[in-house]
Image (cartoon, rainbow, N blue to C red):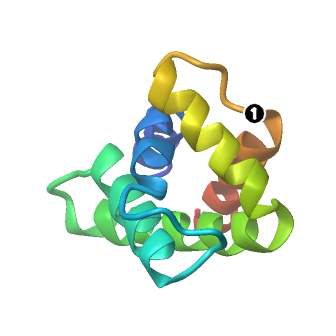
Amino acid sequence: MRTRLLVVISSLAFVAAACAGSGNPEDYDQTVQDNFIEGCVASGSDDDTEAQAGLVAVCECAYAEISTTISYAEFKEFDDTLRENIDAAFPDQFSQIFADCIRNAS
C-alpha cells in the first residue's frame, strides 16, 4: 500500500489542477475541499480497496494540513501556476505535507 500511496506524490499536478475547479472561491470552502479530495483520489486511483482507502486517508490528511498551514492565496497561486504549466515544480511545503500524510497512513 505504501508504494501505491507514493504514486500520489508523483501525480500531484492533477490534484492542484482540480482544487479550485469550480467557481471562483476566495477562501477554503466545501467546494474546494471536495474538488481537492476528488482530484487527489483520482490522481492515484486504484482498484485495490485497501489502497483506495489509504489514498482517501492521505488526501483528507493533506487537505486538512494544507488548508490550515498554507494561505488560500498561496494555494490558489499554485493552482493557477499548474493550470498554465502542468509540469511546474511542486512546492516543497506541499510535498512535505503529502509525505507526512503518507507516512502517517502507513
Residue 20 position (above or below residue 43): below
Q: Residue at x 26, y 51 (%)?
A: 45
Residue 10 location (% of width, % of height): 50, 30
Give percent across and percent down for residue 18. 39, 51
Left/right of residue 49 with respect to residue 96 in the rendered view:
left
- Residue at position x 66%, y 30% in the image: 90
Crowding at dot 1, Cα within 10 Å, few <14 / some 14-19 / many 20+, comes out as few
In the displayed structure, 53 sits above or below 10; it is below
Q: In the rendered image, is residue 44 in sight?
A: no
Residue 33 percent coordinates (x, y): 49, 74
Residue 65 in the figure: left or right of residue 46: right
Q: Looking at this view, is 94 or 80 the one in front?
A: 80
Residue visible at 56% across and 80% down in the picture: 29
Position of residue 70 relative to residue 57, above or below, is above
Q: Which residue is mark 1?
A: 91
Can you tell which quarter of the image residue 102 is in? bottom right
| Amino acid type, label 1 | Pro
In the rendered structure, the answer to whether residue 65 lies left or right of residue 5 reads right
Indicate the quadrant containing the C terminus: top left, top right, bottom left or bottom right: bottom right
**Which SS class for mark 1?**
loop
Task: Answer whether residue 64 is visible to the viewer in this image.
Answer: yes
Please report the residue visible at 71 percent of the width from the left and 41 percent of the height from the top: 95
Between 2 and 46, the residue placed more toward the observer is 46
